[in-house]
Image (cartoon, rainbow, N blue to C red):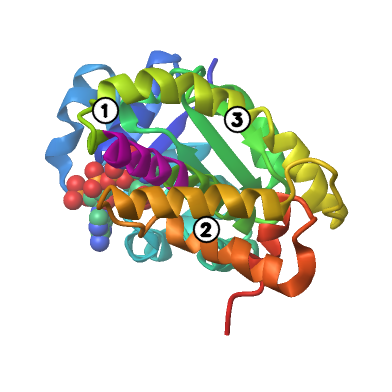
Amino acid sequence: EATPVTVIGLGSMGRAIAGAFLAGGHPTTVWNRTASKAAVLASKGASLAPTAAEAVEAGELVVVCVLDRDAAQEILHPVTDRLAGRSLLMLTSLSPAEANETSAWAARESIAFLGGAIMATPDLIGNPEEASLLYAGSSAVFELHRAALELLGTSTYLGDVAARASLLETGLLASMYSMFAGFFHGAALVGTQGVTAEEFTALALPWLKAMTTFLPGQAEFIDKGDYTTDVQSLAFNKGGLDHIMRISEHQGIGTDIMKPIAELIDRQVAAGHGSDSLARLIEGIRTPKA
Ligand code: NDP
């Protein structure tokens, strides 16, 4: 018999999570501040708890997916005694500091705590190819409920420091946004000569995919802290960035996206690192300009 689970918070993400547990055959109890949002889940077999306290008592694994930390606290603090001895999985987005604070509170209250970060939109939940969830905190909770967690998406455990899920999520999102922004810059640039974004994308897609194969090599420079290279030095890349800046200005588009990259390169070259690898840019990010 599958573990009874509870899902607290039935916004678009909480409903997707509860739906995946139900589809996977888990007895699923749900609670939401606005009870009407549980209607569809109830028709699929979810039990509606009249109060958050009763919801907590129904589940061996209690998943909380509400707006933010304050909302989660408002719901959980009054039911702390009922959570004691259970597994609490926080899928509400928390900052790294909030995750560690919540983990410390749970430890004081004898609640086994796992923090999570959802790298997916609600429609992707339940699809392990597309949905990835990062977990950090109690390894016991992760192992005990692993089968249930795998119903949501590919599950990765990052260790017992609860902050890690949120930290890794933020790093991944930062990588994503800067990639998108670079793509937008490229589309704006080629658009000045009437090239459509669709045409641009046909070339950008294989290009960016090919470029991702360089990431492990960049990681190696970073982890070694040694940026010595004999290919594509910073000085070489400075030429590339200067070229992009000049042509962008000439075509009359903004350089908001590219300028900070050019400046990071300039700082490292000015500091005498022109022959090092591009990966040295991380040093300028680690030590922001005063
Ligand atoms: P929604 O805005 O759809 O839902 C918010 C939920 O929080 C609702 O259940 C709402 O209850 C509840 N809530 C808000 N304030 C309170 C409060 N003070 N007391 C009780 N309940 C409260 O958000 P999502 O479902 O999209 O997101 C939920 C969490 O999942 C967030 O932390 C979000 O960052 C995270 N997430 C979402 C992703 C997404 O693509 N949607 C992706 C990755 C993470 P009510 O219905 O009564 O208003």
Amino acid type indicated by mark 1:
Ala
Q: Quadrant of the N terminus?
A: top right
Q: Quadrant of the C terminus?
A: bottom right
* Label whose residue precedes the other's in the sequence (3 or 1): 1
Q: Residue 3, position in %: x, y? A: 53, 25
Task: Find out whether residue 186 is within the magenta segment.
Answer: yes
Q: Residue 268, position in %: x, y? A: 69, 67
For image coordinates 37% across by 38% down, the residue present is: 186
* Label whose residue precedes the other's in the sequence (2 or 1): 1
Q: Which residue is mark 1?
A: 197
Q: CA distance from mark 2 to mark 1?
A: 23 Å
Question: Residue 161, relative to residue 204: is it above or below?
Answer: below
Do the residues under discs 2 and 1 have CB atoms within 8 angstroms? no
> SS class of the residue under badge 3?
helix
> SS class of the residue under badge 2?
helix
Task: Find out whether residue 54 is within the magenta segment.
Answer: no
> SS class of the residue under badge 1?
helix
Amino acid type indicated by mark 3:
Met
Marks counted in the figure total: 3
Q: Nearer the viewer, residue 139 or 159?
A: 159
* Label whose residue precedes the other's in the sequence (2 or 3): 3
Residue 230 appears in the picture as rendered: yes
Position of 230 with respect to 19 (left or right) is right
Residue 211, disc: 3
Q: Residue 17, position in %: x, y? A: 38, 30
For image coordinates 29% across by 29% down, the residue present is: 47
Q: Which residue is mark 2?
A: 261
Amino acid type indicated by mark 2:
Ile
Residue 53 appears in the picture as rendered: no
Which residues fall within the magenta stretch? 178-190
Q: Is mark 1 within 8 Å of ligand 1?
A: no
Question: Where, by quadrant of the figure, is residue 45 drawn?
Answer: top left
